Amino acid sequence: MDALAAGFGVFLVFLRLGLTSFGGPVAHLGYFHDEFVVRRRWLTPAAYADLVALCQFLPGPASSQVGMGLGLARAGYAGALGAWAGFTLPSAVLLIGCATGMASHGAWLPAGVLHGLKVAAVAVVAQAVWGMGRKLCTDVPRVLLMAAAAACVVLVPSAWGQVLVIAAAGILGILGSLRRLSVTPATAGAGEQQPAPLSRRAGVLWLLLFVLLLVGLPMAARDLQAPPLAMAAAFYRSGALVFGGGHVVLPLLQAEVVTTGWVNQQTFLAGYGLAQAVPGPLFTFAGFLGAAATIAPAGWLGGAMCLLAIFTPSFLLLAGALPFWHHLRHSRRAQGALAGMNAAVVGVLLAALVDPVWTGAIHAWPDLALAALALAALSWWRLPPWLVVLACAAAGWCSVAWPLS
């Protein structure tokens, strides 16, 4: 009972953050630092930096993994669950509700609003490509690796093609000069070693479960011919193999759900735009897609299933890596692999910016002008993404209500 009570206390703290944390993963990490390092003093600044470094190293949504790690250290497994649920549920409920409304009442959003959301997605993804490129492609080898990855993804537009490109970049990072470079300032620092909340045996078991689900879900879906299992496998795979933060999940999910016909491209891009206007982690976009899917279970059940599927590998990897992190963070080969993969994911996101984001939203010069204005608002005027998204939706509605011609 004490563990459950402590976990519920963690849930309430993270629920407030889930309702108010706008601005993306970098902003989320700032909110966490203020709340848990400065205000509540759950851990030291050095220990927090070490946890952030681990979550940047792992695949998955870094801010959500940091939250799970904070909850795990505070109240064990119940704390990890409470932290994830509190931080994730507000945006997940909003997005699943929007998807359910669109499926039941397709005309509840005017066409102009949907188009405005797609144009907003162009600006958001363009800003992400530029920001990640400046941070992760800092020399000629990484720029070339990014360009090669983008070209490969355009030529082989599939989820497994993207995975192979990222894996190949990791191998090149180990073999080439990238291994001499640190991944981030956080990983380069000495940090303060903290006792891991899990044993190494538990870490190995969690990692084995991660691999078992990654391999077993697609096999079960194929053998049983079960569409729900196929969807769960696709979202689990996306959550397990995405490096570089929330925006990079866009091309992986697009390859999984749009090319299979589970969600049409217009709904996909509109949902991605909506995901920018809600607080919390961007990975809750999975709940929107599961609810909007054209195959069962869809609705609230489908949204919950896809949400759990995409976040599960994040916890399994975090719990599996925590006991080994002190040794892993000093490995030059591990740092080189991550440097190569990070450069590749910028290329993957660049390819997604071209198709489907740009091709699905920019059809005439007013669309281009609105996208450029939204990008300026995000990059130079520093307006919050949710405000830019709402402005683009309003502009799209106005363009239909009062056309220029």
Image (spheres, rainbow, N blue to C red):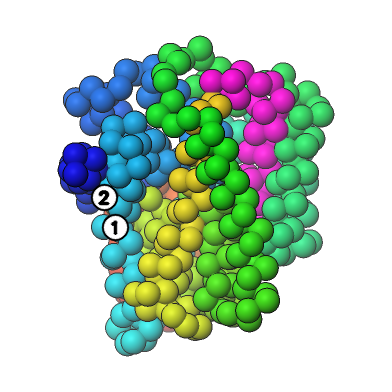
Q: Provide the residue designation for mark 1.
A: 89
What mark, if any, has residue 86 been given in the picture? 2
* Residue density around tag 2, few if under 14, some if 14–19, many if 20 or more, within 10 Å: many
Q: x%, y% of residue 181? A: 67, 21
In the picture, the disc for residue 10 is: none
Instruction: Give the camera-side residue of 136 and 303.
Output: 303
Number of residue marks? 2
Q: Are marks 2 and 1 in contact (CB under 8 Å)?
A: yes
Q: Position of residue 327 (x, y in %)?
A: 59, 20
Magenta residue check for 335: yes
Is 230 left or right of 202, judged from the image as shown?
right
Going by the numbered disc 2, the residue's amino acid type is Gly
Q: Which residues are magenta?
A: 326-351
Kindly state the secondary structure of the residue where label 2 is placed.
Answer: helix
Which residue is at the far right?
175
The residues bearing labels 2 and 1 have C-alpha atoms spaced at a distance of 6 Å
Above or below: residue 364 compared with residue 213: below
Residue 146 location, quadrant: top right
